[in-house]
Image (cartoon, rainbow, N blue to C red):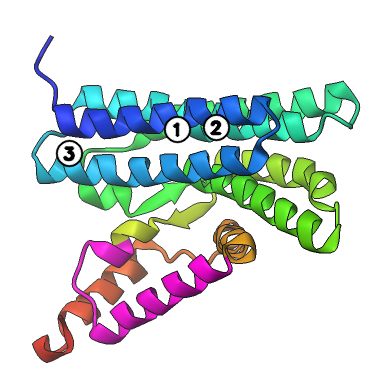
Amino acid sequence: MKRVAVLPSLVTTGSIVCGFASIGSAAKSQFELAAWFIFFAMICDALDGKIARMTKGASEFGAQLDSLADVISFGLAPAFIVMRMLEHFPPKIGWVISVLFVVCAALRLARFNVETDADEDSHRYFKGLPSPAAAGLVASMVLMHNDLMEDYDIDIVPRLLPLVALAAGTLMISRVRYLHVLKRVFDKPKPFAFLAQVVFLGIFVALTKEYSLFAVFGLYAASGVLGLAKAPAEAEADDKELEEEEDASYL
């Protein structure tokens, strides 16, 4: 076997650990902690590819390990949370919805591996809702549920969670186009005003995380359905226009 890059592989392994920790927390009905472990796994998932490219350690091994990590952290973990939170429903309902979510996540990741080329341009858009976004939608609902229960004694989230999980699973295996947000935001220089907007948005999300996280993931899921992701030709035109702006407007 060829040598593998250690640092990005360790970060990807961290995502697997977070996914397992999420399942373990959900098994103890610690749903808020389980949700946070999913978000920690998302951070690892966002960093491993970037680190691999920076260290020139991208490999087929890393890509396969990343897919296995995604199945655990963004397929099994959120599905198990859904099943545990629906324990007051008829058992078959929670079981079926959870299984469908896992299967859709696995199918979506398998399709991504087969259809995605090594070319960077092929990573600018997703076909179907990305599995981390689908998992984030479930996890953010859990955080919102805990806050609603503690402050307002409102128990509506478990009633909506089955529908949201089914919708997220369906969008994962769909052909709906979704924008690759991280690449659009971080891969190229942006005006200073854009940086300020990102900072203020991050502060706002941190202060209102129980509700804003659900709004962010919900809006992202809806963006594909509404056709807000631009076609490649339109995106290229935007990039060209951005590059032609005066150098003084950039950091």
The image shows residue 110, relative to residue 46, as above or below, that is above
- 126 is within the stretch colored magenta: no
Q: CA distance from mark 3 to mark 2?
A: 25 Å
Q: In the image shown, does 118 or 83 lie closer to the viewer?
A: 83
Q: Which residue is mark 1?
A: 18
Q: In the image shown, does 22 or 234 lie closer to the viewer?
A: 22
Contact, CB < 8 Å: mark 2 with mark 1? yes
Res 85 seen here: yes
In the picture, residue 220 is in which quadrant?
bottom right
Element at label 1: helix
Say which mark, if any, is on residue 22: 2
Front tag of 3 and 2: 2
Task: Determine the residue positioned at 89% across, 31% down.
Answer: 89
Say which mark, if any, is on residue 52: 3
Give the residue type that dot 1 points to. Answer: Cys
Residue bounds of the magenta highlight: 184-208
Res 170 seen here: no
Q: CA distance from mark 3 to mark 1?
A: 20 Å
Which of marks 2 and 3 precedes in the sequence? 2
